[in-house]
Amino acid sequence: MANPNKKKIVLPVAPDTEAHGPVKHLYSKKVKLPYGVPGHNLTEMEREVSIDEPPALPINEKLNVLGKRTKRVDAIYKVTGAAKYTADIQLPGMLFGKFLRSPHPHAIIKSLDVSAARRYPGVRAVHVLLMEPGGSVERDSGHDAPAETYNMDQLPRLRYVGQPIAAVAAESQYIANEAVKLIKVEYETKPFVLELDKARKKGAPIVFEEVIEDGGNEGDVGVKAADEQKGNLRGPTTGSFLGGPRGDVEKGFAEADFVLEKEYRTQVQTHCCLETHGVVADWQPDLLTVYASTQNTAGVRDDLAELFGLPKSKVRVITEYMGGGFGSKFGAGHFGVMATMLSKKAGRPVKLMLDREEEHLSAGNRPNSHQMLKMGFRNDGKITAIDLTSYGTAGVGLGAGVGRVAQDMYECPNFRTAQYDVFTHAGPGAAFRAPGNVQGVFALEQMIDEAAERLGMDPVKYRDLIDKHEVRKIQRMKGAEAFGWKYKKPGSDPGPIKRGFGMAQGHWTRFINLNSSATVRINKDGSVAIMSSVQDIGTGTKTILAQVVAEELGLMAEDITVKIGDTLYPDGPGSGGSVTAGSITPAVRNAAYKAKMELLGQVAGAWDVELSDLDMKNGEVFSKTDSSKKMSFGEATKKMRTNQVMATASRPDDYGGFEIGNGIGYGRLGSVQFAEVLVDTETGFIKVERVVAAHSCGRPLNPLQVESQINGGVIMGIGYALYEDRILDLNTGYQVNANLEQYKLPYSKEIPQIETVLIEHYGAFSSTDASGIGEPANIPTAGAIANAVYNAIGVRLYELPLTPQKVLAALGVS
Amino acid sequence: MNRFEYIKAPSIAEALDMMDSTVPEAMVQKTDGSARVVKAGGTDLLDLIKEGILEPGRLIDLKNIPGLDKLSFDKEKGLQFGPMVTIADLEKSKEVKQHYPALYQAAAHAATPQIRNMATMGGNLMQRPRCWYFRSNGHHCRKKGGTTCFAQIGQNQFHSIFLTNVCPCVHPSSLATALVAYDGKVELTGPEGKRVLPLSEFFTPSNVDVTCENVATNQEIITNIMLPPVQDSTRAHYIKQGQRESYDWSMGDVAVVLQMDGKKCRDARIVFGAAAPIPLRRESAEEVLKGKSINEKVIEQAAEKALEGATPLAYNGYKVHLFKTLLKRTIMEAAS
Amino acid sequence: MKNDSKERSPEKKKQGVSRRAFLRGAGMTTAGTVALASGMLSFKPAEPAPAKTALMGPGETEVSLTVNGQQRTLWIEPRTTLADALREHLHLTGTKVVCDRGSCSACTVWVDGTPVNSCMTLAVDVDGREVTTVEGLAKDGELHPVQEAFIEHDASMCGFCTPGMVMSCAGLLERNPNPSLDDVKLATSGNLCRCGTYPKVFDATLAAAKKMK
């Protein structure tokens, strides 16, 4: 039987852990790289690396372009409206698609008749899904028979409001919208279950009778085996790629001086990408071209090639500008497959962008969680045991775990977790900025705060005691200093409006995607281009790539043309999991270095000097020994024997190898955030006044953009902490707030004063030694706010979002 | 969005001649796509059409009718403005800010700056509720002619705590909260001429007519909104509480207009927004204030009185406490 | 008031009719209108487009408006929003549609200088009026100071909210050359950004105001 819930692995959080062994080099060399935090413990680390690797870069202070606040290279196109997103693509003869979606949370389609839709003037193609969509990827390339009517044996069961059933392509969006309403469907509704707690109970309507073979990993706790499915319950997952249970938890609790045991709940959060999911698909006999709003052009290409039986060379995916993904835009998606199918049928390009409601219902979400956390503490502060049980629902999807922070952030000899997925009749979850870990921190960091209070310790000092992460220690110190941290007694303000201070920390694995390649091309006219399929999803990838090449070639970032987001170029990584900067920048630097050596070699020949005597800096090529020998970069390229020199490089293994497999790097990305809130105890209204966010991302390539990313993580965290909540009607299964009016996100007046503290940290991991920042920026915020709210009112809230309703209820006034 | 005809009405008389339906009628009785309805700013109308719950046959635009966007203030006569005056016009008016601070506050906190630039006061008073079931094409609720109220049995955290028995949607206009508190009146023009109603009689609670929120007929257009003059003794304040401070609908809003003789309250009008299907006057609380010096104790009593008879639903019990707080603060601010 | 409008209306009606008759008489057949709709031809009437009192639609009807200083004539259905008219008919895709309901202000343009949501405005409503989009903000190749400051301060990330943000912030500075942080927050209080550019939008706008002095 075909797999009904086939899902793509959408985030490199379950890395390639197969032991390929480190890559061997014929010739290697030893290089000394900066190591540690300048101003604290900076030293040098000697690494043995391939002879092809470029020389070690010094710390940022000694560089010209990297580490400097550099303007986003494509900002001008964004502020003038010239940037073309997928939603803006208009092709000659382009048709517009529209989905018919399930109005029921659980139903069987008894009959379906598309004849009226097909005949509607302006309709050019109709396609009915004969297989069940699972997660965000549709697996239905086989069917394109032009049937008019379908019976129930042919059609998949409907398992959530918004599940795609069919779609049409027509001459205008209006016609498509009208035609789709003409599809006649007879439904037989079935009992359904939406709530996490109810779905777990005996007798609850079952979402999937059959065992789902695939694991989902968006919850970031590893892959679940297929045989662990009972009723709506899947799992438990008892470990992650970092290992399974350790020690003896019962013994640990017995050794504890006190034990804390609490339950925490987090809500479903939707991604709310400003540009909805969607594509423009253009099926031509010799090439399928797809403009996609995606975080992974190469991934979309691979999906479509596989589904439509095409060689990868005949699928081109383009993402020049992209309006936000946050983890939800990886595979081809049901819309990508549908648009391609419609284009194939109609012989014309088809644009299929989800509308705002579809975006909420069917394009992914952060699963909710119910966490039962039990921790044992000794009076000296030592954690003796951690036991974490969690349930979460990703609707019809999988991957509702709560991450690895409990497992990995603090030292504790005895650890155990059981994380369950619960199926419900709701739209599928998807990876969402630090999947699982954001939920996990909300619980863990509140409990650490409680323990600190019980121990009579300042929460910052207490973490100094139990947290062995060196960089995070510096983050705590610098962050506390910037914040002006001092301990305040919980609930101690007089009057109804109370101020509170809180902090929390984050922890994120340093993932590397070795499928990160790029070409650097130097033209005879002095122009330089970078080419890779890696895409810029708003994080600033184009700019850091330009900076890396500019630094290597002695130019400025604006001198470099960045052509990325096109699978005709070498494969780049998907942009998610904070992998992009750490994965693609070494490849780009290495390619630039190779191209530079080629160019210098040709110049050396022309000047009759040794290659090793030449270098580039400040827009010039010069001899290191003979000051008369120098020329501008543009003059030097005129000496090229061919029109261009070009080099391609891929991401080598981390210097020093990987901690696990070929994707988990040594060294976790730590983060610490401090929050100041005001709580109105008479209205329950919470206002975040100030956040200090202390972070590190290896070598910061562009602090201007890093700051923006951190602001973004904090603001998204504020939304999660206070406002966002997917609200389902329990009687009809509809999301009542599937819009941007009642699904509440932070706007301008919800933005606190945000101060970022950036710790430059060198790990000697690669030729750029950079890491990402997207995930770490989002992980601690909700926990820090929750701790600050507690500090303000002296009553702890265990359930997100922290709405006025909940505050008033916790205070016992309503 | 369905296809419709469009015409710019040159005059009220011609608009009246052309219209044959109110928006509520077009959503319940005249659903065959032929309804001819008037359009002011169009922000709510377009929202309904985009959702597919309103399919008009013709929109009769009032923008070209001269004089409907005039705002005038006279110390003796009070404030008067046409239906095409935008929320932003009220927000920017010096007279409104100075003499009708509660109205100014309500205008300044409504919707978004862009919407305030577009939305007219006539449209604001005529707009349909924001109940998420009413707005959903997937829920054929009582207000749309169905038999079920999905909110009573469903997600009702933002719904009414008063007059909840038929349809607990809340009236969407937060401007109306202030207008009713100022004892505003509305002039309706029909083919037979004009009638002037106090706004408190203009709005219809859902237990009187569930499908329509006001008494305007399909042959009437709002042509004027009038507020009585303020006196030297008038004190007023308005507070809106949303979940967010930026763009948000009200979880609760309160307007208070007091006539003060020194510390003593001679007269009071108290109105709750987002508490009921209409802007809800709390006469019992007004009585508590009348003839008394405003102090914490009196305010407390008024707040208790104001929430008497509240019948909160499963998820909106918090509103009872919220309104008490908001009312106390609003009276305090107004009196100070 | 009433009399006044009655006197004016027939005249308007006449003008509206005569102009359309002229178009037809001039041999503007379907091909011609397509060219007009895609903005390849610019048809400049001798006088500003008069407001029409004729019944329009439900099929395509003629609408003339000034977009970024250029007179544009479109054939569109009355249900067409200004956002769609700009994006689909004039190919000015800088204006973004995000929520499609006036909740996010990504579609902000200026109509006669006032910021409005083009997704909640019918194109027929702006017949004869002046529309400024993000594409028209730069003058004579010079970026608007708000645009420059957005680049300088990194006030765009994915960039999808940016056109709306720029139009809100530039609109603020047109009205108030001396804004406070609260004024900027107020002006952008309807603009949604999911990437979290707000702090830098605030910085950029305040910096632009300083620079404009």
Image (spheres, grey):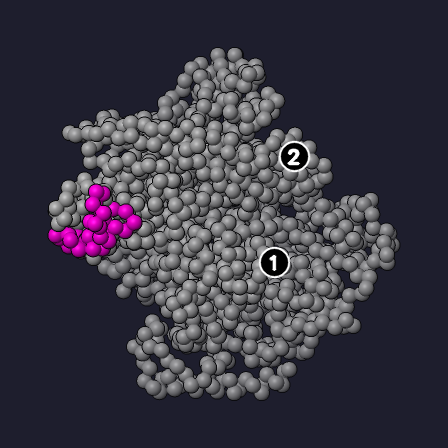
Q: Quadrant of the N terminus of chain B?
A: bottom left
Q: Which residue is mark 1?
A: B110
Q: Choose between C10 and C49: the one closer to the eye.
A: C49
Q: Alpha-carbon distance for marks 2 and 1?
A: 30 Å
Task: Examine the image and state in which quarter residue A381 appears.
Answer: top right
Residue at mark 1: chain:
B
Discs 2/1, front: 2
Please give the range of residues in magenta: A616-644
Amino acid type, residue under disc 2 in the picture? Ile
Residue A323 visible here: no
**Residue A626 is inside the magenta segment:** yes
Secondary element under disc 2, as helix, strand or loop, is helix
Residue at 47% x, 48% y is C196
Mark 1 packing: few (<14 Cα in 10 Å), some, or many (20+)? many
Q: Choose between B335 and A51: the one closer to the eye.
A: A51
Task: Assess whether mark 1 and mark 2 are in contact (beta carbons under 8 angstroms).
Answer: no
Task: Examine the image and state in which quarter residue A590 appears.
Answer: top left
Residue at mark 2: chain:
A
Q: Tell me where residue A798 appears, x and y as whole percent.
A: 57, 32
Residue at 52% x, 77% y is B8
Secondary element under disc 1, as helix, strand or loop, is loop
Amino acid type, residue under disc 1 in the picture? Ala
Q: Is residue B111 left or right of residue A596?
A: right
**Residue A489 is inside the magenta segment:** no
Q: Tell me where residue A747 appears, x and y as whole percent.
A: 53, 51
- Marker disc for residue B242: none
Q: Tell me where residue C149 appears, x and y as whole percent.
A: 46, 57
Task: Examine the image and state in which quarter residue C98 appears.
Answer: bottom left
Q: Tell me where residue C113 appears, x and y as whole percent.
A: 51, 69
Q: Choose between A638 and B81: the one closer to the eye.
A: A638
Q: Is residue A489 left or right of residue A351?
A: right
Q: Which residue is mark 2?
A: A793
